[in-house]
Every structure is written in C-alpha cells, then in structure tokens.
Amino acid sequence: MTTEAGATAPSEDTGTVVTDHDRGIHGYHHQKDEHLKRLRRIEGQIRGLQRMVDEDVYCIDILTQVSASTKALQSFALQLLEEHLRHCVADAALKGGSEIDAKVEEASKAIGRLLRT
Amino acid sequence: MTTEAGATAPSEDTGTVVTDHDRGIHGYHHQKDEHLKRLRRIEGQIRGLQRMVDEDVYCIDILTQVSASTKALQSFALQLLEEHLRHCVADAALKGGSEIDAKVEEASKAIGRLLRT
Amino acid sequence: MTTEAGATAPSEDTGTVVTDHDRGIHGYHHQKDEHLKRLRRIEGQIRGLQRMVDEDVYCIDILTQVSASTKALQSFALQLLEEHLRHCVADAALKGGSEIDAKVEEASKAIGRLLRT
Amino acid sequence: MTTEAGATAPSEDTGTVVTDHDRGIHGYHHQKDEHLKRLRRIEGQIRGLQRMVDEDVYCIDILTQVSASTKALQSFALQLLEEHLRHCVADAALKGGSEIDAKVEEASKAIGRLLRT
C-alpha cells in the first residue's frame, strides 16, 4: 500500500501515506536537522534583504544578496534531490514493475522545474 | 544612517554617494512597500519549507515549493534591476563621462550573478 | 526616425531601421568578429554533442558538454546585453523622453527570458 | 570503438565499462535518432545566430534567439538525464552494493552543473 501510494504520489493529497513511505524508506529525515539549519539560514538571508530594502541599500548590493539566497535554495534542492534518488528511486528500482518509471518521471519533472527557475 | 546603509553594502567604496543617489534619483524607495511585501511573502515560503521538512513531507513536493521560492526571488531581482537601469544607469548616462561605463559594467556583473544561479 | 524606430523597436518587423540604428549608435558591430568567433565555437560544441551521441558516449559526459555549451551561450548573451545597455539604453537616456522607459522595459524582458532558461 | 568513445569521455577511468553498459542496458541509443534530430535543430539555431550578428540584427532579437537555443539545450539535457536515471541508476540499484551511491552522486553533480548555468 505504501508502495502503491509512493508510486502514484502526485502531491500533498496523498501526504500521510507518502510520509509513512518517507519514514520507512526515505533517508532525508536523517539529515532533517541539517536541512532545517540550512533553511533557517536562508530565512535569515531573506530577512536581511528586507532590512537592506528598508535602509535604501544600493540595488546592486541587494541583487548580490538575492543571488546568494537563490544559490543557497538551489543547493538545498540539490541535496534533497540526491537523497531522493538514493532512497526513493533506488527503492522503486528494487521493487521492480512500473514504479521506477513513475518515480523517474516524477523526479525528472522536479528537475525541470528547478532548471526553469 | 546613510553610513549605516553604506556599511551594510559590500561595495562600500561607493556606499555614501550611492545611498544619497538612491534617495535622490533612484526610484526603488517609491516601490519600497511592494518590495517588502514580496520579500515577506518569500520569507513565509521559506518558513513553509521548514514546516514541510519537519513534517517529513514527500521530497518532490518540497522541491516544488523550492522552485516557487526561487522563481519569486528571481522576479524580485528582475524588478529591482529594471528600476536600477531606469534610474541609476539612465542617470549616469546623463551625467556623461565614464560613469555610464562603470554603471553598465556593474549592472552586467549583477545580471551575470543572477544567471549563474 | 532612427530614434522613433529605436524607441518602438519591438522585433524583426522594424529590422532595417533598427539595423541603421545599430550601425549608427550601437557598438556591437565593433565586436562582430569576436561574436562570430564565439558562436562558431559554440556551433562546434553542438556538433561535438552529435558525435558523442552517435558514438554512445556515456550520458553524464554528454551532460557535462551540454552544460559547457549552455554556459558559453549565456556568456555570449551577457556580453551582447552589456553592449546594448552601454549603447542603446545610454543613448535613449540622452535622447530623454519616454524612450528610456521603452528601452529599459525591453532590456528587462530580455533579461527575464535569459533567467527563465 | 568502445575505446574511442571512452577517449572522448571526460571521466575516462570508467570509459570502457560504461560504454558497454550503455550498449547493453542504457536506453538512450533507442532514442539516438531523436537526439540527433534535436541537436541538428540546435546547430541550425546557432548558425541562425551567426547570420543575425552578421546582418547587424537588433541585439534584443538576438538575445531572444539565444534564450530559445539555451532552452532547447536544457530540454535535451533533461531528456538525456531522465533516460540515464531510468536505465543506469535503476540498473545500479538492482546490482546493489555501493554502485548506486556512486551513480546517484554522479547524476547529482551533473544536475548541479546544469543548474549553475
């Protein structure tokens, strides 16, 4: 059942099952603390941007900070993606059947969304 | 306060002048509220990401949210850049002399940093 | 007339006038040879990709070459954009009136298209 | 010929095996014709860019064409990557052992290079 849900997992509507799936096979909760630390740092960068705008800091310097925040978000995404490939996709391959195709297509679409931004 | 703003700016050598310049000619303080609203929305998205990680939400759904935040940051940067070109760069052109070259080179480097991320 | 055409220049339909405009004010024909050399190098990279696919080279190595070609295209675009800002946009600023707004909006849209890819 | 393919491959240490692997399990030679067609189209776009520069076409119109070519390269890369995940990575998972980690890390680095451009 976890398997089916994992295979078809489109989005949040299947949240719970997917979460079980994550807990069971997915590895990213091992790195949860690191992820949360990264995201809090990015949140701090965004608040820093608000301060800069509020203090009329020179636009070019604000743009430099925006680039840093975007880079940080991208590298967070990349780490998450790597764990996903290592755990969910590899797991789907072991299960065999059509699940691997669904997982790979899903991952590729996510990579495409990252590339378009 | 000009100094404070200047101090928070990486390229401090042009800090003071630039900040006065911003106040005087530069237009982005007209849109300050809009910019701050955009940034607060992005800050909320980053906090949403922390919740998602904390609740073991499926990685693909987290990646979708990361893409949305990156897109929002990019479009904030683009709006800031457009105002910068309209005000600082145009102003430098009117001043004549070598300032326009410095401003254009500076803006191009900023665009390059945005493209690389 | 060149001015009007330059100001309203939306796309290829105003080709000729724009070309005069380029010849007159725009600087990029000075770097024409350098641009053509860059583009021929990129064309060679694309042909190299065809060879790699044809010889069943490992996909990861093909992807590395794709990244190099994309980077080369982006840096070509960036150089073209810098010349455009230095010449057309600065020129529009000197002309005064609404032309600068049209030019800046046009340039920002072009930057947006580069960012989205 | 395997050697030749290996020779053109940056990560030459895995050259031979990888190429056999491609021939055997990897799927991209099934889509070889489609890939070559895509790449020839991109090559044509790059030649089009040379014509545009040569004819002093307005820079903004050249930039639009550059964006189109970059997009085409990215979507070629994405398709190649999807096939790679479906075949090489899934295959490594079935083999078990440490190969999956090596493959996933390799794929993630490739995705990172695509994102940085």
Image (cartoon, coloured by chain):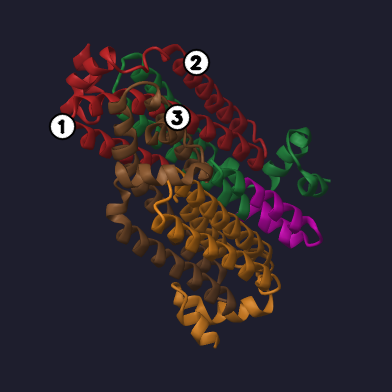
Chain colours: A brown, B orange, C green, D red
Q: Determine contact: label 3, label 1, CB under 8 Å.
A: no
Question: Which mark's residue is nearer the viewer, 1 or 2?
Answer: 1
Instruction: Give the quarter of the figure containing the N terminus of chain A.
Output: top left
**Residues indicated by labels 2 and 3 sit on the same polypeptide chain:** no
Q: Position of residue B74 (x, y in %)?
A: 55, 54
Q: Determine contact: label 2, label 3, CB under 8 Å.
A: no
The residue that label 1 is drawn on is D97
Question: Which mark's residue is nearer the viewer, 2 or 3?
Answer: 3
Q: CA distance from mark 2 to mark 3?
A: 22 Å
**Mark sitting earlier along the chain (1/2):** 2
Viewer-nearest residue: A61 or D84: D84
- Residue found farthest to the front: A1
The residue that label 3 is drawn on is A105
Q: Image point 49% across, 15% down: which residue?
A: D37
Q: Image point 40% across, 49% down: which residue?
A: A77
Q: Image point 51% across, 51% down: which residue?
A: B65
Q: CA distance from mark 3 to mark 1?
A: 24 Å
Quadrant housing residue D53: top right
Q: Position of residue B111 (x, y in %)?
A: 52, 54
The residue that label 2 is drawn on is D37
Q: Is residue D77 visible?
A: no
Q: Amino acid at mark 3?
A: Glu
Q: Amino acid at mark 2?
A: Lys
Residue B100 inside the magenta-drawn segment: no
Above or below — where is B113 with respect to A112?
below
Quadrant housing residue A103: top left
For label 1, the crowd category at 10 Å Cα-Cα, with few meaning under 14, some 14 to 19 and many 20 or more, is: few
Q: Is residue C108 left or right of residue B55?
A: right
